Amino acid sequence: MALSENKQKMLRGELYHAFTPDLIADRARCKHACTRYNNAGEVSRRRLTELWRDVVNDDTPLPPRAATSAEDDKLFEQDPWVETPVMIDYGTNVRLGKNVFINFHAVFLDTCLIAIGARTLVGPNVSFFSGTHPLDPVVRNGTQGPELGKEIHIGEDCWIGGNVVILPGVNIGRGSVVGAGSVVTKGVPPFTVVAGNPARILRKIETAMDPQQQSGPGGRGWPKDHVQGAEIPMAKMAESSEGLETLLGEK
């Protein structure tokens, strides 16, 4: 079925009208799918995956059922794990990579695409707001006026702390960490810790995953088993963040 011009404008991040029959129906479909997912109760991993795919309107066939429950659960090890309850506007504009974990009370306003890369962990009460409104109240005009959005992209291997708000148009680079309670208003470089309202850079993450830190000219040559833990409180990180922001071009 061809998309209406209004819906195409929404997906392109242009001004569009949200209270048209087709978009109202799209949101109603997702609302009912979320209700079924949130109220699933104690069901198998297969059933939960099936319900989640219904939320995001993914019609990929499930694999044939395995001989035992344990073996069947393993078939879905790579699928995202989304705790309930979760609230989503459309569902069709949410893309979660392999091994993504979303904790409870997540909110996805997926006016535009919200993409989260593989192995990213998201804490509780995190909101992804890809939709926004005109500042001029004459244009905004309640439910009769237009709105718009910008895509949100979260890289692979990120960690988003609890109670974080991610605003329209934000790109968070691979392997980065967003401290709890932060409001992310602009892009985050790869392998960086940010926190605050608005979020600002606290430090660079030392990791063998970063190509710039690997062995070779200018590289650190981390051993294979190098692991950097969360041993430094974020408040302490902030004390030395000034020079790092300058280094990364954030000031």
Image: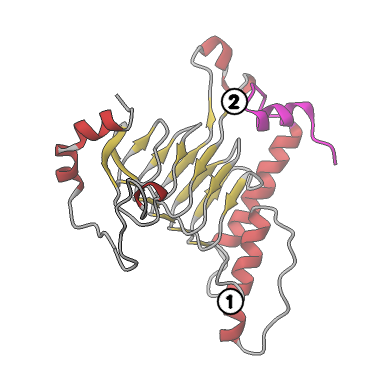
Q: Residue 221 carries which label?
A: none
Q: How far separated are the C-alphas under marks 1 and 2?
A: 38 Å
Q: Position of residue 189 (x, y in %)?
A: 39, 38
Residue lying at the far front of the rendered structure: 217
Q: Is the magenta stretch mostly helix, strand or loop?
A: loop
Q: Name the residue under label 1.
A: 44
Q: Which of the 4 image quadrants contains residue 178?
A: top left
Q: Which residue is drawn at 51% across and 53% down?
A: 86
User: Residue 36, how many percent across, how many down?
Assistant: 61, 61
Residue closest to the far right: 1
Of residues 221 and 122, the one nearer the viewer is 221
Answer with left or right where residue 40 lies relative to residue 3: left
Pick the front one: 8 or 219: 219
In the rendered structure, which segment of residues is drawn in magenta? 1-20
Q: Does the magenta stretch include residue 33?
A: no
Question: Is label 1 in a helix, a strand or a loop?
Answer: loop
Q: Mark 2 points at which residue?
A: 148
Quadrant of the drawing holding the N terminus: top right
Q: In which quarter of the image is the C terminus?
A: top left
Identify which residue is drawn at 70% across, 36% down.
23
Q: Please state which amino acid type lies under the numbered disc 2.
A: Leu
Horizontal side of residue 123 vs 179, given as left or right:
right
